[in-house]
């Protein structure tokens, strides 16, 4: 029970606010549709480039700036939707030298375009904005700006906004389906502090009592992956010899933590070695890999993974599996960096499919252990995390309203994938599938249907009922069995239509396959020696 309560409190909290990450929202408004769907005012233009130029004033907790948006015209429409959440305000919009009119509907702003929008043309629009952005109360779960100070009284600031949306602090096309191709992030902040954002530092400008940093992202990036982190940072770095050559790995930490970080961050190159083995090359060599210390737990910001696990092994010093294996690595380094493949390389199109991010990445914790400690250790860990699964609602959320599914997407997702590995019966084939996903959907946004189809095709198995059971139903398959007169009878209950997943069992000490379905089946058995393989995420019930 202690382990379950720990998970409920810190790994997958469901906040009461309707805007919180993984909130249990069941009714939806017009604003949810504007935020969560591909509206006509979004569909007609394709993002190509952002230049976000923002000044951060820590003493006032105020920001102001502009975002210049380049886009390709797909089909000209009279209005263009830009998202910016209150209390932030758009002050003006400029295109082709003209100031444009716009109307506001909640957090959605509809800009009336006046110049010609030829199909195929690249157009540019600049959004000026300012305000006091929402302050995160429990980052990263509720999101916004974290305005903190370090132990020396210096400002320590960071953004985090998954679920809530990047539009909580900067104007953008705030829907995951359309990733910008590249991006420049320019941040002005008081001198004496350093800003670290995504990509690589191109230039640092001295503006007297201020400093301006310019970070360029060479690869497509999702909205919530964009971040700014401002603090009394120092840098250490190393070069990793990876599958695509030399990879720069940079670590930005508070000045007082440099020596501690040099030792503790040894998990980072270990992570890279394990995940390149399982998932393929790190997807953002051009942008480097960074760990950046922040005043909250951490998040998977692309090429700028944020870290706040207090330099402890496990999850803030706790093992979420209850097996001991979770203390062999720093949870935040491994989990959040795993998102570079599943979340940043392969990104969901709709928040309802967030399990693609969290299920595969929770599973990556298990694969890290597999790489360094072996298959049984990794199985111990992922099976141990089953105690954190609640089966409260489906893993997949509701589409087109910015709604995530159950927090079970973490460890139910991981155990689903662990089960699937057993069904494939070939670990090298399984590895090829994981690497193949990252190659097939490289730098793309995807749907659950695409992931299901890819895996089914590669395994040459019809996995539709399998995915329906674990992603769209809250019941866990239960194998009922009884043994009478040297006869074993068995069947599945609590299953969706056509669910007939085979499982491995030991009967009289010998391993063999059973092929249960919803009907009773019978086979001869010499003794009462019947054990179901623990690697399959099912319940087992002996009928009396």
Image (cartoon, rainbow, N blue to C red):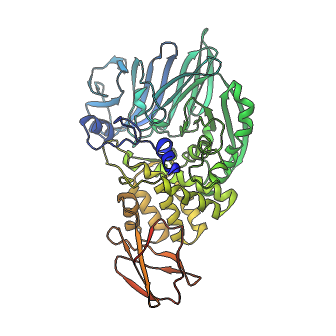
Front in this rendered view, residue 369 or 105: 369
Name the quadrant of the C terminus.
Answer: bottom left
Tell me what residue is drawn at x 50 percent, y 44 percent: 11
x and y percent of residue 239 in the render?
73, 41
Front in this rendered view, residue 198 or 62: 62
x and y percent of residue 45 in the render?
35, 37
Q: Is residue 486 above or below residue 283?
A: below
Tell me what residue is drawn at x 50 percent, y 37 percent: 225
- Residue 64 in view in this figure: yes
Tell me what residue is drawn at x 67 percent, y 62 percent: 374
Q: Is residue 513 above or below residue 86?
A: below
Instruction: Left or right? Give the position of 128 relative to 117.
Output: right
- Residue 440 in view in this figure: no
Q: Is residue 381 above or below residue 83?
A: below
Front in this rendered view, residue 56 or 109: 56
x and y percent of residue 8 in the render?
46, 45
x and y percent of residue 495 in the render?
35, 68
Q: Is residue 182 above or below residue 413?
A: above
Instruction: Left or right? Give the position of 501 relative to 81.
Output: right
């Amino acid at each position: 029970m202690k382990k379950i309560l720990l998970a409920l409190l810190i790994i997958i909290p469901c906040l009461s606010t309707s805007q919180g990450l993984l909130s249990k929202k069941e009714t939806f408004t017009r604003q949810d549709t504007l935020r969560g769907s591909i509206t006509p005012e979004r569909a007609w233009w394709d993002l190509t480039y952002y230049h976000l130029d923002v000044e951060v004033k820590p003493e006032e907790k105020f920001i102001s700036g502009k975002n210049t948006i380049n886009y390709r015209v797909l089909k000209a429409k009279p209005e263009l939707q830009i998202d910016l959440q209150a209390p932030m305000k758009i002050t003006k919009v400029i295109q082709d030298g003209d100031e444009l009119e716009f109307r506001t509907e909640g957090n959605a702003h509809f800009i009336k375009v006046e110049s010609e929008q030829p199909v195929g043309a690249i157009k540019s629009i600049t959004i000026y904005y300012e305000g006091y952005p929402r302050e995160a109360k429990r980052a990263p779960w509720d999101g916004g700006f974290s305005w903190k100070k370090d132990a020396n009284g210096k400002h320590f600031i960071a953004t985090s906004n998954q679920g809530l949306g990047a539009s909580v602090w900067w104007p953008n096309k705030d829907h995951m389906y359309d990733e910008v191709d590249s991006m420049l992030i320019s941040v002005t902040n008081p001198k004496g502090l350093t800003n670290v954002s995504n990509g690589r530092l191109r230039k640092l400008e001295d503006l007297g009592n201020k400093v301006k940093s310019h970070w360029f992202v060479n690869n497509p990036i999702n909205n919530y992956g964009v971040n700014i982190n401002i603090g009394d940072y120092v840098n250490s770095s190393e070069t990793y010899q990876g599958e695509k050559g030399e990879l720069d790995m940079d670590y930005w930490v508070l000045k007082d933590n440099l020596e501690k970080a040099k030792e503790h961050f040894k998990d980072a190159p270990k992570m890279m070695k394990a995940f390149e083995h399982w998932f393929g090359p790190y997807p953002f060599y051009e942008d480097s890999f960074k760990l950046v210390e922040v005043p909250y737990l951490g998040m998977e910001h692309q090429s700028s993974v944020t870290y706040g696990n207090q330099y402890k092994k496990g999850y803030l010093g706790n093992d979420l599996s209850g097996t001991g294996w979770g203390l062999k690595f720093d949870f935040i380094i491994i989990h959040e960096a795993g998102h570079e493949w599943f979340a940043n390389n392969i990104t969901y199109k709709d928040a309802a499919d967030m399990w693609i991010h969290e299920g595969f990445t929770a599973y990556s914790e298990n694969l890290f252990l597999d790489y360094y400690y072996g298959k049984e250790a990794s199985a111990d860990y992922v099976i141990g995390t089953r105690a954190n699964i609640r089966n409260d609602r489906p893993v997949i959320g509701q589409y087109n309203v910015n709604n995530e599914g159950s927090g079970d997407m973490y460890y139910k997702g991981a155990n689903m994938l662990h089960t699937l590995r057993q069904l494939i019966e070939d670990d090298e084939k399984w590895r090829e599938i994981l690497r193949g996903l990252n190659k097939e959907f490289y730098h793309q946004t995807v749907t659950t249907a695409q992931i299901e189809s890819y895996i089914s095709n590669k395994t040459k198995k019809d996995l539709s009922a399998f995915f329906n059971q674990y992603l769209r139903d809250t019941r866990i398959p239960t194998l009922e069995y009884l043994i009478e007169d040297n006869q074993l009878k068995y069947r599945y209950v609590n299953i969706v239509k056509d669910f007939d997943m085979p499982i491995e069992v030991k009967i009289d000490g010998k391993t063999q396959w059973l092929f249960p379905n919803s009907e009773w089946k019978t086979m001869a058995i010499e003794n009462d020696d019947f054990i179901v393989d623990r690697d399959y995420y099912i319940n087992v019930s002996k009928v009396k």
